[in-house]
Image (cartoon, rainbow, N blue to C red):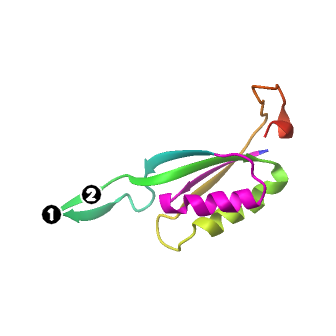
Amino acid sequence: MKLLKCVVRPNALEKVKEALSGLGVMGMTVSEVKGFGRQKGHKELYRGAEYTIDFTPKIEIEVVVKDDLAEQCVGAVREAAQTGSIGDGKIFMVPIDEVVRIRTGETGDAAI
């Protein structure tokens, strides 16, 4: 199993959700996060004063999928979230050793 941590622009959430649902992903966790990458934030003008925005608002989507579905999910997220501009986000793929459904005690793929 793999954990996909997808950090995307807030306006990409619906497209990514639809893309993953289309592949059969049953659940996901979504968090509002802030961060920066290579660009180290950006400058904006407000009432004539320039100021730096260090952290950009993003959405982090976490899903756990079977190994054979992981690459398809990465492709679907990338296609749904890509604009071609700086700040489109990142996808991190992390191996998962075990999953346990608390309610039933199911483990492994059955618990996803």
Which numbered mark, 1 or 2, is in the foreground of this view? 1
Mark 2 crowd level (few <14, some 14–19, many ≥20, 10 Å Cα): few
In magenta, the rendered stretch is 2-28
Q: Give the side of residue 36 with respect to residue 107, left or right.
A: left
Q: Position of residue 18 (x, y in %)?
A: 66, 61
Q: Residue furthest bottom?
A: 84
Q: Nearer the viewer, residue 78 or 28?
A: 28
- The residue indicated by pointer 1 is 47
Quadrant of the snapshot with the C terminus: top right
x then y, percent, for residue 11? 50, 62
Magenta-drawn stretch contains 17:
yes
Q: Badge 1, how many Cα within 10 Å: few under 14, some, many 20+?
A: few
Q: How many numbered circles does the render carry? A: 2
Task: Using the numbered discs, state the Cα–Cα distance from disc 1 to disc 2 in whole angstroms.
Answer: 14 Å
Determine if the magenta segment contains residue 7. yes
Q: Which residue is mark 2?
A: 52
The N terminus, quarter of image: top right
User: Is disc 1 placed on a helix, strand or loop?
Assistant: loop
Give the amino acid type for the residue marked by disc 2 in the picture.
Thr
Q: Is residue 31 left or right of residue 41?
A: right
Q: Residue at x 78, y 30 (%)?
A: 100
Q: Residue at x 51, y 52 (%)?
A: 59
Q: Residue at x 42, y 53 (%)?
A: 57
Q: Quadrant of residue 72?
A: bottom right
Give the vertical position of 99 relative to 7 (above or below): above
Q: Secondary structure at mark 2?
A: strand
Disc 1 marks a residue whose amino acid type is Arg
Place of residue 77 in the rendered image (x, y in percent of width and height, measured from the top left): 65, 62
Residue 93 screen position, x and y as percent = 68, 51
